[in-house]
Amino acid sequence: MKKKLNLFIVELKETFSVKKIFKELFTLHLQEYFLLFLMIIAQVATFLFIKNSSLLTLILSISSIINLILVDRGRITNFFWGSITTMAWVIIAIRTHLIGDIVSQTFYLIMQFIGIYIWGKNLSETNKPEVQSKKLSVPQSTLYTIGTALLYFIIVFISKKLGGVQIWLDSALLPLAIVGQFLMTFGYRSQWIAWNIINIINIVIWYNQYLINGNSMALSMLILQIVMLFNSIYGWIIWFNKSKIIVQSK
């Protein structure tokens, strides 16, 4: 237990190290820098040209984009950016009364620290700079699918009792978040199925929020979700190819 705690402390310091954060930002591929540039420009333009744009939303957007690019590459400092993203998102979700978002983002925040331990252990065992991609077995896929469906209907019931907004869509976020985050933490490529569905749902949710409220925060979040969907598709391609290379090399 003490050994595990010491490992976690070491990896935590490493993940939040300024030197490590900048080092891993300079390990991306050219196409990823291009993608990163386009996504950040889109968010900054949104912030500058939309009236009453929220600085909190801009911070969330930029940290989320960097986080996702680093997840694409399997870099552990994604959890530093993920922590910033989830804390900002919880605040926004509280302001907009999205119960599913509040719970799912709180879960994400907790999982950032669990992820640091699991990924740190994985990297130390493989002695590689990137977490390796794995494929789920059929029984594992079946179990995750059934578990997600059951949890979804439980969240729908709770959201109705709490007076949530857009219940049937919003309630899907937590089950998918749990599955996606666990799959990501343990290095499974199927995480990207969850992230793609989550991003599509969030596009619909924030589009509806914009139609209802017409505020700049909703529009900024809508644009962010569209950007995140493009990135999650790219992440799926990267992780699928990594797992295919690993299988072929065995």
Image (cartoon, rainbow, N blue to C red):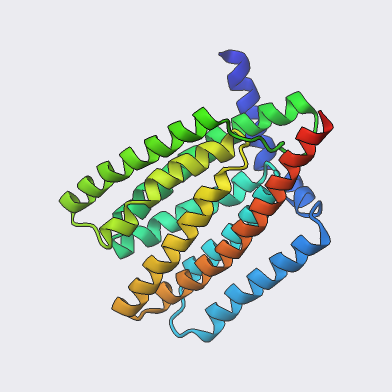
108 left or right of 250?
Answer: left
Q: Residue furthest left?
A: 161
The vertical placement of 85 against 50, above or below, is above
Does residue 106 show up?
no
Q: Residue furthest front?
A: 138
Quadrant for the C terminus in the image: top right
The image quarter in which residue 46 lies: bottom right
- Residue at 81% x, 51% y: name it: 27
Q: Nearer the viewer, residue 217 or 100?
A: 100
205 left or right of 180?
Answer: left
Number of on-image labels: 0
- Residue at 42% x, 78% y: name it: 216
User: x, y percentage for residue 184?
Assistant: 58, 40
47 left or right of 95?
Answer: right
User: x, y percentage for residue 78?
Assistant: 64, 47
- Residue at 49% x, 84% y: name it: 50
Quadrant for the N terminus in the image: top right
User: x, y percentage for residue 214?
Assistant: 35, 81
